[in-house]
Image (cartoon, grey):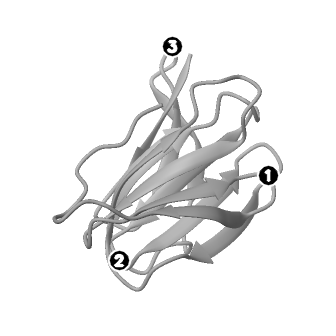
Amino acid sequence: TICASGSADLTVRVWDCDSLSCIHHLDGAHAKEVSGVSMSRASRGVVVSVDKEGRIAIWDHVSNTVKKLSALNTAATCVRCSSSSSSTLAAVGYQNGIVVIVDTAAGAVVQKLVGHDGEVHAVDW
């Protein structure tokens, strides 16, 4: 069993929960503290992370490749990959109340959802 974490130290880590060890480490993808991480159910090895600068990192820790996006010029507050094993979409919430839908396979924003009057604290599928 593995899990992912993001930190104020600007890093994202993938952990092996059985051996209690860090098995992969992403450094340099974020300029400000990481505010959310989510693991893809559709793409084995893909972790999506967001930071307080608004940057989105789509990291395949198996191949060690990273796609970086800046969808909005405000802090990203949360992220959640689709719960479907066939969907490569992720939802990202922002401080300005916007939710952005990202295609993690393409590394592109596919939709912006506008409607909240305040900061988005959680997203889910």
Disc 2 versus disc 3: nearer the observer: 2
Instruction: Of the two numbered discs 1 and 2 on the same chain, state the one appearing first in sequence.
Output: 2
Kind of residue indicated by mark 2: Lys
117 shown above or below 28: above
* Among the two numbered marks 2 and 3 on one chain, the one whose residue lies closer to the N terminus: 3
Nearer-the-camera pick, 56 or 27: 56
Q: Circle 1 sits on which residue?
A: 105
Q: Are marks 2 and 3 in contact (CB under 8 Å)?
A: no
Q: Nearer the viewer, mark 1 or mark 2?
A: 1
Find residue 103 and report its horizontal and vertical position in percent. Answer: 70, 54
Callout 1, which amino acid?
Answer: Ala
Outermost residue, bottom direction?
73
Residue 50 x %, y %: 44, 62
Asked if the residues shown at circle 1 and circle 2 are in contact, with their CB atoms under 8 angstroms apart, the answer is no
Q: Which residue is mark 3?
A: 18
The residue lying at 65 percent from left, 45 percent from top is 89
**The N terminus - image quarter:** top right
Of 118 and 69, nearer the camera is: 118
Find residue 58 and report its horizontal and vertical position in percent. 65, 58
Q: Point out residue 59 in the picture as x, y percentages from the top left corner.
A: 67, 55
Crowding around mark 3 (Cα neighbors within 10 Å: few <14, some 14 to 19, many 20+) is few
Q: Is residue 52 left or right of residue 72?
A: left
In whole angstroms, how far apart are the C-alphas of marks 2 and 3? 30 Å
Badge 3 amino acid: Asp
Rendered residue at 22%/50% (across/down): 121
Q: Which residue is mark 2?
A: 32
- Label 2 secondary element: loop
| Residue 64 in the figure: left or right of residue 117 | right
